[in-house]
Each structure stands twice: as structure tokens, then as C-alpha cells.
Image (tube, rainbow, N blue to C red):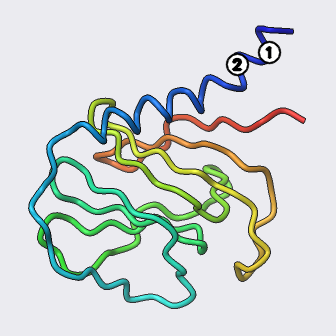
Amino acid sequence: MLHGTMTRIQPFAMLLAASLAVASAPHAAPRGDIRIDDTAVYPESLSAGPDGSVYIGSIKGVVFRAPAGASVAEPWIRPTAQNGILSILGVLADAPHRTLWICSSPSPIRTPPAVGTTALMAFDLKSGAGMVRSAPKH
């Protein structure tokens, strides 16, 4: 029983550890505005990588990325049947682990509605390739 509880808590403990590691990293110089040329995006959160890239999560379920110095963020990771992304309610660039963490969640306000299970997901910070998906067991 305890083992099952630890398994469910472990991804969230990893996210907390990653947050603390990123918070203590050196910060890049301020940059100007970043535009997203899309509709119904509803940006929800953002995080910056050590190279100055900015990652923006959206209710639309797309992770937008603006490379260092860019004024426009382009779609980088899109929801697919394979990755199972719904709406994104959090992104975190975890440089020490070369990982982009995202929190995926159902959302009735997305068109079409995002239906499914909340999950913590990890993607390669450089390529955007999916690495891990952890969802609660019902």
C-alpha cells in the first residue's frame, strides 16, 4: 500500500525538485515582448531555458517556443494521440535534467473540449521529444 502511494507522489516530488533547481539557476537578461500568431491560444504559463528560449503553455494544448532573441513564439509541441496532451496548465524548463515539464489537464473551454486524465509530462528540452507521462490511477 505504501509503495503505491509513493509511486503516485514521486512525479510531483520530481517537479518540486526541478522547480527549486531552476529557481536557483542564474537568470538571463530581460527581453522584449513575445507575440503568438494564433487564435484561441489562452497562454497559461511560461518558463525560460538557460539558452534564453521561452516556452509558453496554452489552454489550446500547444507548447509555443520563442528562441533567444525572437519576438514571435512558434508552435513547438502539439497535442497528438500519441502524447496525450490536453490543455496545458503549467510548463517548467528544467535545465539540469534537460527536460520541459508540462501539466496537462482536461478543459471544457478548449475547442474542441480537451477530455481525458490530468497528467505530468516530460519532454526533451532540446528536441521536444516526449519522454515520460505520469497520470493518477483511478
Which residue in the protein does label 2 denote? 7
Q: Is residue 83 rendered to the left or right of residue 30?
A: right
Local secondary structure at mark 1: helix
Tell me the tag on residue 48: none
Q: Is residue 27 rendered to the left or right of residue 137?
A: left
Count of marks overlaid on the render: 2
Q: Tell me if residue 6 comes above or below residue 71 in the rendering.
A: above
Q: Position of residue 60 (x, y in %)?
A: 59, 74
Which quadrant is home to the N terminus?
A: top right
Q: Amino acid at mark 2?
A: Thr
The residue at the point 30 percent across, 39 percent down is 22
Q: Nearer the viewer, residue 88 or 77?
A: 88
Q: Is residue 83 rendered to the left or right of residue 54?
A: right
The span from disc 1 to disc 2 (Cα, nearest Å) is 5 Å
Q: Tell me if residue 50 comes above or below residue 99 in the rendering.
A: below
Which residue in the protein does label 1 denote? 4
Which quadrant is home to the C terminus?
A: top right
The residue at the point 38 percent across, 89 percent down is 37
Q: Position of residue 95 (x, y in %)?
A: 27, 38
Q: Amino acid at mark 1?
A: Gly
Q: Nearer the viewer, residue 29 or 60?
A: 29
The residue at the point 52 percent across, 56 percent down is 90
The residue at the point 84 percent across, 32 percent down is 137
Q: Position of residue 100 (x, y in %)?
A: 41, 46
Q: Nearer the viewer, residue 121 or 5?
A: 5
Could you say which quadrant of the image residue 46 lies in?
Answer: bottom left
Label 1–label 2 contact, CB within 8 A: yes
Q: Tell me if residue 80 comes above or below residue 108 in the rendering.
A: above
